[in-house]
Image (cartoon, rainbow, N blue to C red):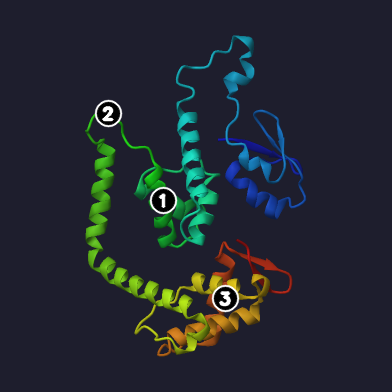
Amino acid sequence: MVVFHCGSCGEALKKNQVDKHIGSTCRRVQTISCIDCGKDFTRDSYKEHTKCVSEQEKYGGANYTAPTNTNKGEKKQNQWFEIVQSAINQNTGSAQAKILLQKLQYYPNTPRKRAKFINFVNNSIKGFPPRSVEEVWSILEKLLPKPSNNEPNQVKKTDVEEQNQSASAENEDANKSQLKRKSNDNDEQSSKKAKVNDEDENNQAVPTNPRFEWYDEIKRALSKATDQTLSLEALRKKIFKRYKKLKPNQEKDDDLLFEKLEKKIQRAPFVQQLEGNVFRLSE
């Protein structure tokens, strides 16, 4: 893994630690250096530095000879970057799926199996709902290379174990998944109707037991605002109005709703906070 040297405090940082460091500890640092090759990078350009010289290559001098299999990992990594870039260029999927694809450019060690991919995103990137993670996997899966005809048809033991574990988990939650799927279908149908007849939304039929999608409603409110910007109070009024319309029979304290709204705003990757508790759609 590439390791960087902070130009301000001198601390050695792994690549996945740099953003947090320059965002909190050393906010004014201008350059970050790679410890292995010594090259300087700006606060943004370091993300493109995904590989570096090995210790043997650095100190081997003229007598250094690269191993025959030295490019095997690099080829796989480059292949992954090409797949992610192809998915980005297609410009398909929801807004959150596009944001997640952009972030995946900086994670070369992302697993290529569905269960491990979903687990990796949930633990390493975070902030994305399961529906968006599944959507991104579906996009990438179509671009992954298919096995050639010359390869044996046998499935590796690890793949069989992974498939068995996945199938077992899916069977265990079969009933719950069916109920959740029906609920999501109702939510999607309600959302489509709301977009088509948005100007007359007060006359729309409300589903019996709709699911309130906080991130979707926040994005919806900001996208319709002037300059896609709203104050916290204005955003609160719009979200509360929408919540009470979709859930008229569910009584909930406004303070609790406001607390939940604030948490959702802070976690939403598509929201940028300006001065004075003003928020803007960042995508």
Q: In the image, is 27 to the left or to the right of 201?
A: right
Cα separation, mark 2 vs mark 3, equals 52 Å
Location of residue 177 in the rendering, given as x and y in whole percent from the top left corner? 28, 66
Q: Which residue is mark 1?
A: 139
Q: Residue furthest top?
A: 63
Location of residue 24 in the rendering, given as x and y in whole percent from the top left corner? 69, 55
Q: Going from the N terminus, do you reach mark 1 or mark 3 first?
A: 1
Residue at 50 percent of width and 51 percent of height: 101
**Numbered mark located on residue 221 in the image:** 3
Location of residue 252 in the rendering, given as x and y in whole percent from the top left corner? 47, 87
Q: Going from the N terminus, do you reach mark 2 or mark 1 first?
A: 1
Q: Quadrant of residue 249?
A: bottom left
Disc 1 marks a residue whose amino acid type is: Ile
Q: Is the C-beta separation of discs 2 and 1 under 8 Å? A: no
Q: Which residue is mark 2?
A: 151
Secondary structure beneath dot 2 equals: loop
Secondary structure beneath dot 3 equals: helix
